[in-house]
Amino acid sequence: MVAQHRAGTLKVESTARTPKSFERVVREAREDRLIPGVDELPLVEFLKHMPERPIRGEVPLPGYQTQKVFDLTYEYSQKILNQLC
């Protein structure tokens, strides 16, 4: 993606078929995520098919205080783990 962006050949569309800039795609990937286990991705089903190994994930929640991010991440992680076991 970076190479295409630099070459001026990057074409990015959203699911609504509206073009997005490279900067918007990067910002969305970094900041517009939800807590793992929330939204459309069937995370539990996805994880059930993964080999057993440690996993990690970022939870960038701009605007939330650190403790709130920790609390929400812990709560949702527990829900996911309970569904996996």
Image (tube, rainbow, N blue to C red):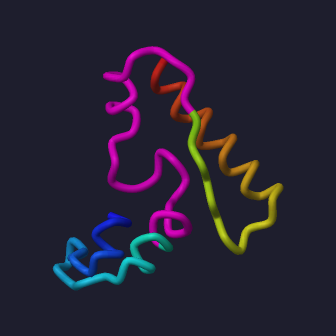
Q: Residue at x 16, y 80 (%)?
A: 17
Horizontal side, residue 21 vs residue 35: left or right: left
Residue 78 is situated, as x and y percent measured from the top left of the image, at: 62, 33
Residue 57 is situated, as x and y percent measured from the top left of the image, at: 57, 43
> In which image quadrant can residue 79 be found?
top right
State whether residue 44 is above or below residue 39. Answer: above
Horizontal side, residue 16 vs residue 70: left or right: left
Q: Residue at x 46, y 15 (%)?
A: 52
**Residue sitting at the far front:** 7
Q: Residue at x 59, y 43 (%)?
A: 76
Report if residue 68 lies within the magenta region.
no
Q: Which residues are magenta?
A: 28-55
State whether residue 13 is above or below residue 69. Answer: below
> In which image quadrant can residue 18 be found?
bottom left
**Across the whole image, how many numbered discs are drawn on residues?**
0
Report if residue 46 lies within the magenta region.
yes
